[in-house]
Amino acid sequence: MTTKLPPGVLAYFREQGARGGRIGGGRALETMTREQRVARAKKASAAAVVARKAEGEEDEGQVSGENHPRPDATDPTGFVIDD
């Protein structure tokens, strides 16, 4: 069951999340070595690539979210798909 939060509560949560995000970068700079920060960034980047690929599989054959096939779409046998 999902319920909507009151606007004041939602604004508070957004503010707290933004505050934590601003603290995170500076805190990492103070407490992590350069190598640790690089490793964290690479891990985040790899996760983003996986997420984009997973999202792209759902839209395979689609042009940036539009609901029509690409003009050059072909099936596995090499025939051009005409709709």
Image (tube, rainbow, N blue to C red):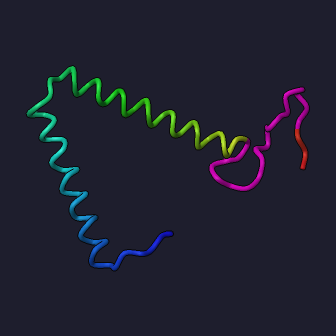
Residue 73 in percent (x, y) is at: 80, 38
- Please, is residue 15 above or below residue 80 in the view? below
Report the residue at 22% width, 24% height from top. Answer: 36
- Please, is residue 20 above or below residue 12 in the view? above
Q: In the shown orientation, is residue 13 left or right of residue 30? A: right
The magenta segment: 61-80
The image quadrant of residue 10 is bottom left
Residue 75 in percent (x, y) is at: 85, 33
**Residue 1 forms part of the magenta stretch:** no
Report the residue at 21% width, 20% height from top. Answer: 35
Q: In the shown orientation, is residue 11 left or right of residue 34? A: right
Q: Nearer the viewer, residue 74 or 8?
A: 8
In the picture as drawn, the residue positioned furthest to the top comes out as 35
Report the residue at 14% width, 23% height from top. Answer: 33
Report the residue at 23% width, 57% height from top. Answer: 18
Magenta span: predominant SS is loop
**Residue 76 forms part of the magenta stretch:** yes
